[in-house]
Image (cartoon, grey):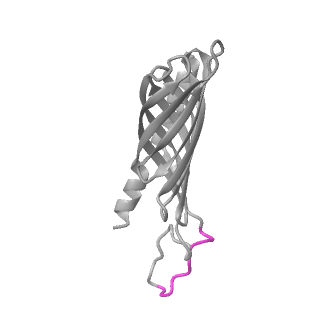
Amino acid sequence: MPSLSLLWLSGLVMLLSCPSIVWSQTSEESAPVPSHKNSVAPPDWDGMGHYRNTWDLELSGVLGTSFGESENALSGGLDVRVGALWLRGTHFHALGMVAGWLAPVGPWAGLEWDWSSTRTGLWVQLGAGLALEERGVGKVAAGFSLFGVDVRAVSDPENGPEWFVLGHVRIPVRLILLGLTRL
């Protein structure tokens, strides 16, 4: 397990050290031709909607109950996702490494995909990873704006899967920053 932690830590350092080099590039083919030769079109505008590749950071908190070995036990946790964010029109797609802590499971790390709509405020997340003792973790979350419902399953070879139903609060740091720069 130490090698897995080292792998995630090195990936996190790489993402934080060079996000503008990797993801802040826009498509030159989709940039509109300026109507006036002295005007400059925004680099992320394609005439139909927005187009941008950039970095992503999201913080999440969950609180709820578990079903399984520790049935009806209060459970909660925190997650941090760092990765890439793609803006296409009114939809955001994000893919990144997620690290978190979930009671009573403990620390876990994995990969998470996120889809969000700026038009409706709806979002969906899918994730998978590993907890300590080689236990698999899977998650599905959906919601509106900053709030949602999170369902997680944690494998347990001896007792079967343990299920969690959790309230989900998310803070999409990068989406908030993008919104503030548009004001």
Q: Residue at x 64, y 19 (%)?
A: 160
Q: Is residue 10 above or below residue 160?
A: below
Residue 134 in the image: above or below residue 166? above
117 on left or right of 128: left
x 41%, y 50%: residue: 146
Q: Position of residue 107 (x, y in %)?
A: 48, 23
Left/right placement of residue 118 relative to residue 159 reads left
Q: Residue 27: where, in percent of width, then height?
A: 59, 65
Instruction: Report the residue that reaches farthest toward the bottom.
Output: 36
Q: Position of residue 153 (x, y in %)?
A: 58, 29
- In the rendered structure, the answer to whether residue 176 lies left or right of residue 142 reads left
- Residue range of the region highlighted in magenta in the rendering: 28-37
Q: For this view, does 43 lie left or right of residue 181?
A: right
Query: Does 115 appear above or below 164?
Result: below
Residue 147 screen position, x and y as percent: 42, 47
| Residue drawn where x is 33% and y is 67% of the image | 183
Q: Based on the picture, tell me whether residue 70 belongs to the magenta stretch.
A: no
Of the 4 image quadrants, the one containing the N terminus is: top right
Q: Is residue 32 visible?
A: yes
Residue 32 among magenta residues: yes
Displayed quadrant of residue 91? bottom right
